[in-house]
Image (cartoon, helix red, strand yellow):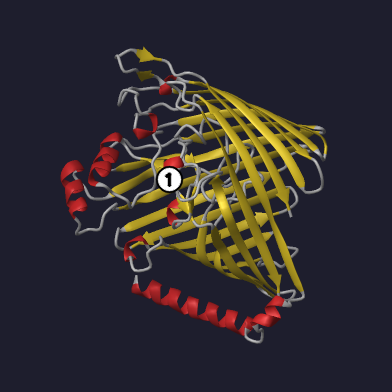
Amino acid sequence: MKTRRHVVTITLFIASLIGALAVSTLSFADLLHASSIKFGGYYRARQIYYHNIATQNSENTSYFDQRFRLDPQFNINEDIIIKTQIDMLDDVMWGDNVDAGNAVYTGNPSNNSQYYPYGVTTPDGTALLNINVQRVWLEYHSPVGNFSIGRMPYAFGLGINYNDGNGFANAWGDAYYGNTADQIQFATMPMGKDGPLVTVLDFAKQKGNNPNDPYDDEDWYTFVPGYKTNKLTAFLLLLHIEQNAFRKNINYAELYVDAKPIQNLKLLLDYFYMGGSLMPFTASSAGSAAMQAAIGTSTLKVKDAQGGVLRGIYSMSPLDYVLEVGFSPANGNTANQIQTYPFSNDYNSSLILFNNTGLAGPASFPNTTISTLNALGSTNIPSQSALKDDFLYIAPMVKFVPADFFKAKLQLMYAETNDFVNYAALAGRPAGKPGRTLGYEADLGVDLTLSDNFIFGFQTGYLIPGNVFDYTNSVGQDKSADGVFAFVTRFTVLF
């Protein structure tokens, strides 16, 4: 471990030296008068309406939110670029000024928002800064490859686990925060710019808000070999995550393939596998001792956690026919084993079911473990969903694009899981009552580009909940959940 930390320290020193040499002759005035300064970004305002979002008791909600994002880019010269991302009123509800009491429950849209200090609040009641510099990083295009250092997106493949949060490629809804890490990254093409091979090396740090707290500090070591031609792109992400205080030791692999086997047909595959272990408490804490007594161990094992998406797209202008299948054959059923649900909150596979009914989330624990951790007040594990073994969804879609200014899409969806245990996400349903069908959903969306940079869009969807959402009412009667209707209107200005 000490040898590895020495290597990381030396790497950081060399990276800092390269960065200093690259910009040492530039003053701040030079930066402001650089040969090329570009401003990108967008302003977005949305009106959102949900009917019966709780799937019972006819609970309705309607609200507006907004975001203003700037992406200034400083092109110092052809080889040196400084990129930034600045968010203002970042998905903040209209009329809200630091008042968590105004929150509405629509799932957990602010996926990584626990890292943001106070200022204003999002629709889930999370406090944010009014103005937040999310990312700043330096890119140096050297003769042997691209070198990057700073706080930048951590993204891969279709974004089912790691994505940049920009969200414009999402089929439904919008992304919120994505994944960000402080990184040193080197990317090169070993056979030259015309060769098919790509290699990426990356070291990343993940921390929370408190710089004096050593217990949330993680080291991420990433190696990505890749192959890219006109008809085939294939990348393999190999990631090792470790954290000493919580004995976190995770190994993660993800394969992304983009193939064009015949004309007009594209096949996309994104599949991950994860294994390892972690402690949700420090070894000497009372929580660790209590967990040891409750379930017989203080260590949680990641047991064959895996999942993925297969997507086929057949294009026959002006129509695209899309079939997407998501799956997670998770294993493990003992009290100390973690099982997974395969998507981040910023991966949109439906308008309602996964993004707005409390089902979105990166992982789930068995019932005995999650109840023990909740009782002990653990804050060192990610937010949990309620899905367990053999999760599956099937989503056919038709896209209609007759002109650049008009786009429409219609999607149907079916989802199920072999086992479901009711946690806090679906309050009112009998704990432990098994269910299989998550539901059926139909979604419709239209985007109109009213000028070169102004986009008006609306989306609507209806969910017929499956027996997973059945509940028992206040007088002990078993009830089937009611349907959920959603309507979203969006105004976006790109610049």
* Residue that extends furthest to the right in the rendered view of this protein: 403
Q: Tell me if residue 335 can be seen.
A: no
Which residue is found at the position 27% from the left and 44% from the top?
373
Location of residue 244 in the rendering, given as x and y in whole percent from the top left corner = 32, 63
Classify residue 334 by image quadrant.
Answer: top left
Q: Which of 393 and 77 lies nearest the eye of the viewer?
A: 77
Which residue is found at the position 34% from the left and 70% from the top?
1
- Locate residue 70 relative to residue 62 in the image: left or right: right
Location of residue 104 in the rendering, given as x and y in whole percent from the top left corner = 47, 37
Disc 1 element: helix
Which residue is found at the position 50% from the left and 61% from the top?
181
- Locate residue 173 relative to residue 452 in the image: left or right: left
Q: Which of 326 and 353 lies nearest the eye of the viewer?
A: 353
Q: Which of 305 and 51 lies nearest the eye of the viewer?
A: 51
Q: Tell me if residue 214 can be seen.
A: yes
Q: Amino acid at mark 1?
A: Ala
Residue annotated with mark 1: 100
Q: Residues within 10 Å of mark 1 (few under 14, many from 20)?
A: some
Location of residue 495 in the rendering, given as x and y in whole percent from the top left corner = 74, 55
Classify residue 383 by image quadrant.
Answer: top left
Which residue is found at the position 57% from the left and 52% from the top?
89
In this rendering, the answer to whether 310 lies above or below 56 is below
Location of residue 256 in the rendering, given as x and y in whole percent from the top left corner = 59, 48
* Residue that extends furthest to the left in the rendered view of this protein: 293
- Locate residue 308 relative to residue 459 in the image: left or right: left
In this rendering, the answer to whether 24 lies above or below 426 is below
